[in-house]
Image (cartoon, rainbow, N blue to C red):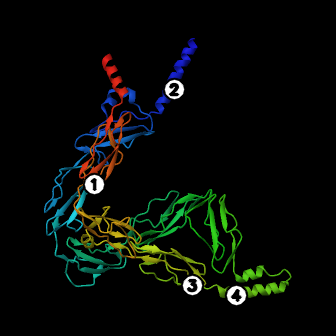
Amino acid sequence: MRFKSCFFILVTICSGKLFAEGKPCDLPHIENGKIAQYYYSFKSYYFPMHKDKKLSYSCMVGYTTETGTQDGRITCTAKGWSPVPRCYRKCSKPLLENGFFYGTEMYFKIHEKLQYKCNPGYHTPSGGTEDTVQCQPEGWSFQPSCTEKLESCQVPNLRHGHYFTAQKELRVNETLLYRCDEGYRTAGGSATEAAVCLTYGWALTPNCTRITCSSLNAVAHGGFYPVKKIYEEGDVVHFFCDKHYSVTEFDLIQCYYFGWHPDPPVCEDVKNKCPPPPLPPHGHITTVRRTYHNGDKVRIQCQRTFEIRGSEEIRCEEGKWTPPPICIGAMDKQESEAPPSLKSDAAIRTNKTYGNEEMKMQQDCTSPPVIKNGAVLGPLLASYKNGSSVEYGCQHYHFLDGPRTVYCDQGNWTEQPNCLKPCTLNVTDMDSNNIELKWRQEELIFLHGDLIEFECKQGYNFLHTTILSPGRTQCDHGRLKYPKCVMQAPTEKCDSPPSIANGALTLPPLTQYDSGSSVQYSCSDYHFLEGSERIYCSKGQWTLPPVCIEPFWSRIWYNFISSTV
């Protein structure tokens, strides 16, 4: 009997341990926030909580969650509560001189926006008359300001370059063309640039900076030379590795105007690694990798006019490649298909004839063609062997369209790529169309093919609302079609929906809702929703929200505890 009691106690302890392992979340501490009171009253009953259990919390007055709501919802995971419950102080309205804010609110939730307008003769940091700041956990996205508009721009002194005009002052919207000396680049990263005078100064102040590349990090199991703090355009660095290690891909890299090319290599253990795949004459691989390990496969292709014989796929096995195929030309094919009855001297004559023919067929290429807004990466040669290849790169902000690598094929280069121009946003055009960037960013330059999203300024709607995404446009060969917004008719909107006790919205709220919009509520764990879970915006007012009712058994338990005390 004594043994049975011990066994029962042991099982109870073990099962209790297993039970605790599945409940990793204790009562959360939320600065400037709280959870329902009964969780504190019956802490030992509710905590620690099981994984995947959810918990609602509320922020105190003057604080909001990171999503801008008064209430938040967290989930118990193996590593604790996710996301970590936090309450952030609301943003107070900032000071603004020479302008005014829309609206009379003094405090703003996280992610809420505040629009302002400058007085006549003044402009925002982006050059417009209006702008918008957003309340973020660390404060406003930027300090709103209104500065006096300029009527002209002074031409600054230019070192390591020259202007194409002798003017010392330009009017607004006039352009100043300048060129930098060799080894230097303009403010936009080009050799030549046109700077535009705007009402707030130069769009990009004329400047010529030395083209340099970043210093190189130390290489594990190897090194490089020469070692410098700053590398200039044209510098070449050679990498080497210790014994039993090899360089991944290229051991030489060069400093270009856009940085290092190719990327600096590393030293890898030669064990379980293959060297670059063996290529037959007139053959090339479709994709190039930095390293090859056991099990890696490579597909080989032959040049035009050549036929592949053997397996076109080779495999890295224990540091070695399986035998590669061969590329057979027209004369090789005739020889391989010759009848076995041919005499040996005839075969010898055929070989000799083919040898001369092959020498005639192998035609070298001259230097690869020059492409606009791009160049060949690496040193240029006067002549290239048949089957050789070169790689092209584009200037800063230009998009490479077409094959990066071209090949010498019987005296002719395969098709070269094009470097497509970027698009530069024009603030004046944006203002005239009553639009602004949907996502704020420092750069106003976009690559060819980039999708750019605009939104209407406050009080405006897109003109073409039948389009699926009227605010989205695409950069096309340096050209950009701006969407247009027109003044909207006044409509009655609803403010953010009301908060409810022991419940929250299923999605973060917006600052305003159009008439006819709806939102959905859900209750905290162990609570019951009474009423409609969805409310609607109608003529500027929300329909009645639901109520989250505390469970009946928790009240009985609370009364029981109170009566026993």
At label 4, the amino acid type is: Glu
Crowding at dot 3, Cα within 10 Å, few <14 / some 14-19 / many 20+, comes out as some
Disc number at residue 195? none
> Could you tell me if the residues under marks 2 and 4 are in contact, i.e. CB atoms within 8 Å?
no
- Asked which secondary structure carries label 1, the reply is loop
- Asked which secondary structure carries label 4, the reply is helix
Disc number at residue 412? 3
Q: Nearer the viewer, mark 2 or mark 3?
A: 2
Q: Earlier in the sequence, mark 2 or mark 3?
A: 2
Q: Nearer the viewer, residue 449 or 462?
A: 462
Q: Nearer the viewer, mark 2 or mark 4?
A: 2
Crowding at dot 4, Cα within 10 Å, few <14 / some 14-19 / many 20+, comes out as few
- Asked which secondary structure carries label 3, the reply is strand
Q: Which residue position is annotated with label 4? A: 357
At label 1, the amino acid type is: Ser
Q: Earlier in the sequence, mark 1 or mark 2?
A: 2
Q: Earlier in the sequence, mark 3 or mark 4?
A: 4
Q: Which residue position is annotated with label 1? A: 515
Q: Is residue 513 left or right of residue 240?
A: left
Q: CA distance from mark 1 to mark 2?
A: 56 Å
